[in-house]
Image (tube, grey):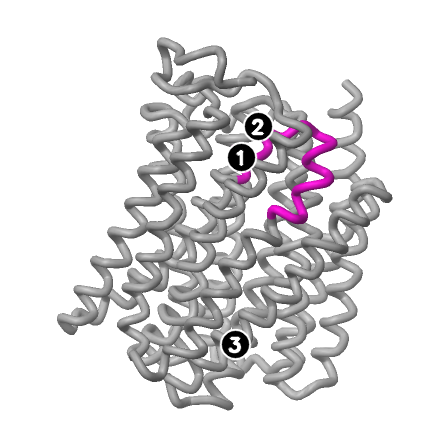
Amino acid sequence: MSNQNGPTQEEPQTAVTEKVSGRAAMVLAVLISMAAGSVLCGYEILRSSANTLFVQAYGKQGLPWALGLTLIGVALLTYLYGRLLSWLGPRHTLQATTLLAIATMLGSYAAISAGYKPARVVLFIFKESYVVLLIEQIWSYIDSTLEPQAARRLNGPICGMAGIGAVLGGLFLGKWSQSMGTLNTLLWAALATLLTIPFLQVLFARFGAPTEGKKKQGGHLALHLFRRERVLLLLIALIASTQVASTILEIAFKSALQDFLPDPDKQNAFSGNYYALINGAAMLFQFVVAPLLLSRFPGRVIHLLVPILNLGALGYMLIASPLWGSAVAYGTFKTLDYSLFRAAKELLYGPLPFDARYRAKEVIDVLGNRVSKGTASLGVTLLQWAHVVFSSVAFACIGLGAVLIWLCLAVPLTSAAQRERSS
């Protein structure tokens, strides 16, 4: 096992020296799922609460520009991550960024309680950035430790087990938000996130951690790899198209939510139950559909199937009422994103070198993800300033265009990934 090699001079901790399979892979999957589940539980509590607190202060018309400001927040967080990774290595970087996330939640709670209005903007931007950074670090660890065949079998269930935490967070919010007040739920989000730390401690003690992180090869974010690895270029373009669709659907849903449920506590309760339902549906896909499809079909089939299903949901949005049309389309996107798309996408990183899995991956799945989301939001903001009124049909049409681009990129991406595995 990897923990028999002892600590290295570069990283005073157990080092991962070979990929895990068999029963050990099952143990790793459970531990990593518990850590990710704690992060997602805190996020589900924080996500709706941060949105509600922001809309209370700035109105629904502030959503696009606030999402646009995530460009700054996510760029700073990604750069900080790259520096921490070079300084601390993967293990301590994940622990440090988790603690920084908790401190931000508690600081925002104190500032909002004191009546500091801009703290609501900070919290809104933060919740759009931190969860991706933490979860992608966890997936970088999975991609670095699971043997490929074990990953095909376990990536879906890992998403599902972690999703239990997300469901619990949503149900907690739906049951207690009105009685305790939206602001006080921030404390529970911090507590749920804190539970991540002990699971990480056990995980690293049992399976070790990669030690390459302290070796700065070509910069803290390994941007040089994008010139060399076609898979990475196609991945960041594909992620950009998915996030344009996600952003448009999110704005459409949250705008409809504010129109149909203006009372903040009722809106927050509806939102909590809605996200719990999404996560419950995603769990069905994660435990049953993803392992079944990934074990029987090549990755290309999955990467084509997901955008095709999204096109069907967007077609429904064109003819349905604004609230239910956007709810179905956004829910379909999120359900597939959390299950089939995530499980299939992570398999693409497995054959790539460490810097691609830990550095370039964060550029793609954190910076590329949120920059695309922020750019789309700024575009909506500029058009609103030009007095362009967005209807549910207009949002659906933009989403259809983004998903069609996604579908077109999936073919060369999977071809490039196949060549990478064969080389």
Gap between marks 3 and 1 measured at Cα: 30 Å
Q: Mark 3 against mark 1, which lies toward the viewer?
A: 3
> Relative to 196, is 170 on the left or the right?
right
Residue depicted at x 55% and y 16%: 17
> Which residue does the numbered mark 2 point to in the structure image?
144
Nearer-N-terminus badge (3/1):
1
Other-residue count near label 1 (Cα within 10 Å), few / some / many at <14 / 14–19 / ≥20: many
Q: Indicate the position of residue 148 as horizontal and vertical percent values.
A: 70, 30
Mark 2: which amino acid? Ser
Residue closest to the eye, 200 or 185: 200
Q: Secondary structure at mark 3?
A: helix
Residue depicted at x 40% and y 11%: 8
Residue depicted at x 52% and y 76%: 273
> Which residue does the numbered mark 1 point to in the structure image?
140
Above or below residue 84? Residue 242 is below
Residue stretch in magenta? 139-158
Residue closest to the eye, 367 or 103: 103
The answer to whether marks 3 and 2 mark residues whose Cβ atoms lie closer than 8 Å is no
Mark 3: which amino acid? Asn
> Which residue does the numbered mark 3 point to in the structure image?
273
Mark 1: which amino acid? Ser
